[in-house]
């Protein structure tokens, strides 16, 4: 183990030096990566179609290649899944991260090339550890194990080849180098199980008596596992189960609605470190203790462009490069990657908090909002307002979703919230009023639409019993892994489906 500790320490020093370099020279690093990406893919079918061999700068690239999304690239991706290669990227691609997103039930199969797996996803994991250890020289992270909560995957056999489809976490874990297994729990036979109910029991049995020093996984499913372990061990906090526990590495969804519960489970002892990783790439790491900002990782084989708010969901939207971005302005991220995603509109929205170095906060998704009445309520506003209402009432939220109440006849519209409380507020009308006031303070468009109840009425809060969202996700076969509860929607699809299921149960 001491040999592995020495290797880890060497890697940490090396990477902190490299991170320092791209923080000092961000534009140069990005320009270099764009040229490397274009040069590498110039002889692919996509590269030839768009004349990559004659593109010399970002402006020519943006003029030559239209903005893409999954639908526009799906024909190429489907052909790769069937065995064709050298279409989007010159490496053989046999792994696909399956994602249904948060606002679309249709499965997406995001290509994961060998280079993107190692140079992006694994680099992100290594840097996560390097930054954490650099910030905490006293850490004992390498004396124990990391409990990594993964999803599942399947192998599909075709006429002359096979491919893997599944959660990104499952693909990442199943291809880890041998040395990484010394620090990870549980065994692959348990980590990649598909049946969540059976997996939960085996996860608990395989980890609750080990020396776990860190956790990694999506907050919603990690909470389910940790509560189950505490119940089985008859313990009140994680420190009673794992005395050497240090840190929870989290990502995939906003941590704000879950933070209070994790703090209680940890008994006030334990760090949190946020990551911005997705099926399409690993983009950001919380590099400073006590800050909710993420450092944009610029040397993972990703070239970034940014779509201003007035260009969202607009055909032929105009992007800007990293060097033209400003702080405090909402952007949708557009990426070009070593997995063959070209000018791909990710749909995730961010705001930069600083320039040089480029740090940012995640604010939501371009499709994750309610704007039925011109209120432009984004998920970041919603989660911050809920946090205010919870703080003032002592409530704790487990899961939630919200959508519009459409106008009918003389009735004004509104927002309906289905909330599963871990701890109920003393009064739902009071909670609704506090939520409403917080939303007004955070969002001027919402405040204007609420004036005198002319357009929007007070928020309608529906408190549902514990387990409602779990049962609904189970009914959709979306337990575990990177499956997420849809937070906001501009229609009533999720609201009505959940309410219908409640009545059916």
Image (spheres, rainbow, N blue to C red):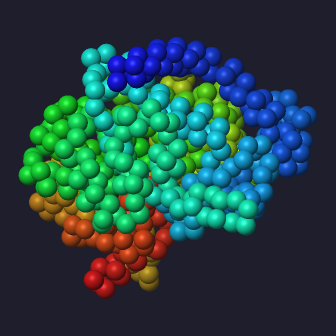
Depicted 183 relative to depicted 479: above or below: above
Left or right: where does residue 135 sit relative to residue 54?
left
Q: Position of residue 496 (x, y in %)?
A: 40, 77
Residue 282 in view (yes/no): no
Depicted 36 relative to depicted 71: above or below: above
Left or right: where does residue 53 sit relative to residue 25?
right
Depicted 252 relative to depicted 468: above or below: above
Q: Position of residue 414 (x, y in %)?
A: 38, 68
Q: Name the residue rendered at 69%, 49% in the picture.
A: 93
Residue 330 occupies quadrant: top right
Question: In which quadrant of the rendered image does the N terminus lie?
Answer: top left
Q: Name the residue rendered at 19%, 52% in the picture.
A: 229
Residue 212 occupies quadrant: top left
Q: Residue furthest bottom?
A: 504
Q: Name the residue rendered at 15%, 34% in the picture.
A: 243
Question: In which quadrant of the rendered image does the C terminus lie?
Answer: bottom left
Q: Name the residue rendered at 57%, 68% in the picture.
A: 106
Residue 94 in view (yes/no): yes
**Along the line of sight, which residue is nearer the eye, 470 or 304?**
470
Depicted 505 relative to depicted 454: above or below: below
Left or right: where does residue 111 sit relative to residue 374?
right
Residue 202 occupies quadrant: bottom left
Q: Position of residue 253 (x, y in %)?
A: 41, 49
**Along the line of sight, which residue is nearer the eye, 410 or 135?**
135
Q: Position of residue 263 (x, y in %)?
A: 20, 41
Count of number-bearing discs: 0
Left or right: where does residue 390 sit relative to residue 407?
left
């Amino acid at each position: 183990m001491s040999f592995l500790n020495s290797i880890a320490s060497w890697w940490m020093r090396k990477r902190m030096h490299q991170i320092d370099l791209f923080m000092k020279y961000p534009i140069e690093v990005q320009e270099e990566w764009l040229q490397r990406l274009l040069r590498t893919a110039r002889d692919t079918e996509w590269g030839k179609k768009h004349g990559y061999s004659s593109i010399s700068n970002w402006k020519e690239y943006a003029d030559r290649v239209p903005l893409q999304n999954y639908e526009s690239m799906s024909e190429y991706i489907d052909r790769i899944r069937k065995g064709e290669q050298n279409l989007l990227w010159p490496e053989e691609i046999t792994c696909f991260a399956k994602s249904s997103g948060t606002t679309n039930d249709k499965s997406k199969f995001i290509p994961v090339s060998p280079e993107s797996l190692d140079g992006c996803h694994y680099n992100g994991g290594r840097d996560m550890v390097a930054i954490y250890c650099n910030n905490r020289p006293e850490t004992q992270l390498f004396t124990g194990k990391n409990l990594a909560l993964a999803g599942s995957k399947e192998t599909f056999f075709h006429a002359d080849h096979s491919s893997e489809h599944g959660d990104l976490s499952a693909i990442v874990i199943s291809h880890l180098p041998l040395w990484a297994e010394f620090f990870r729990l549980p065994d692959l036979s348990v980590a990649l199980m598909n049946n969540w109910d059976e997996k939960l029991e085996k996860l608990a049995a395989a980890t609750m008596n080990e020396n776990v020093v860190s956790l990694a996984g999506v907050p919603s499913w990690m909470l389910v596992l940790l509560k189950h372990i505490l119940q089985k061990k008859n313990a009140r906090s994680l420190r009673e189960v794992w005395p050497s526990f240090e840190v929870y590495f989290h990502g995939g969804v906003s941590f704000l609605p879950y933070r209070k519960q994790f703090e209680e489970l940890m008994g006030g002892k334990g760090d949190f470190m946020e990551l911005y990783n997705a099926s399409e790439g690993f983009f950001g790491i919380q590099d400073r203790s006590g800050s909710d900002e993420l450092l944009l990782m610029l040397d993972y084989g990703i070239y970034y462009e940014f779509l201003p708010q007035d260009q969202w969901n607009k055909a032929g939207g105009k992007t800007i490069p990293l060097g033209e971005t400003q702080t405090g302005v909402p952007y949708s991220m557009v990426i070009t990657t070593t997995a063959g995603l070209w000018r791909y509109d990710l749909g995730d929205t961010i705001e930069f908090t600083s320039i040089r170095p480029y740090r940012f906060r995640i604010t939501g998704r371009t499709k994750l909002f309610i704007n039925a009445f011109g209120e432009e309520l984004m998920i970041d506003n919603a989660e911050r307002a809920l946090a205010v209402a919870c703080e003032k009432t002592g409530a704790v939220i487990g899961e939630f979703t919200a959508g519009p109440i459409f106008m009918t006849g003389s009735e004004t519209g509104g927002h309906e919230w289905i909330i599963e409380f871990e701890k109920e507020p003393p009064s739902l009308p009071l909670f609704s009023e506090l939520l409403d006031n917080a939303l007004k303070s955070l969002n001027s468009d919402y405040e204007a639409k609420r004036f005198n109840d002319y357009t929007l009425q007070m928020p309608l809060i529906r408190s549902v019993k514990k387990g409602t969202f779990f049962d609904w996700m189970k009914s959709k076969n979306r337990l575990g892994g990177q499956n997420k509860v849809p937070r906001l929607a501009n229609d009533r699809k999720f609201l009505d489906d959940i309410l219908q299921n409640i009545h059916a149960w």
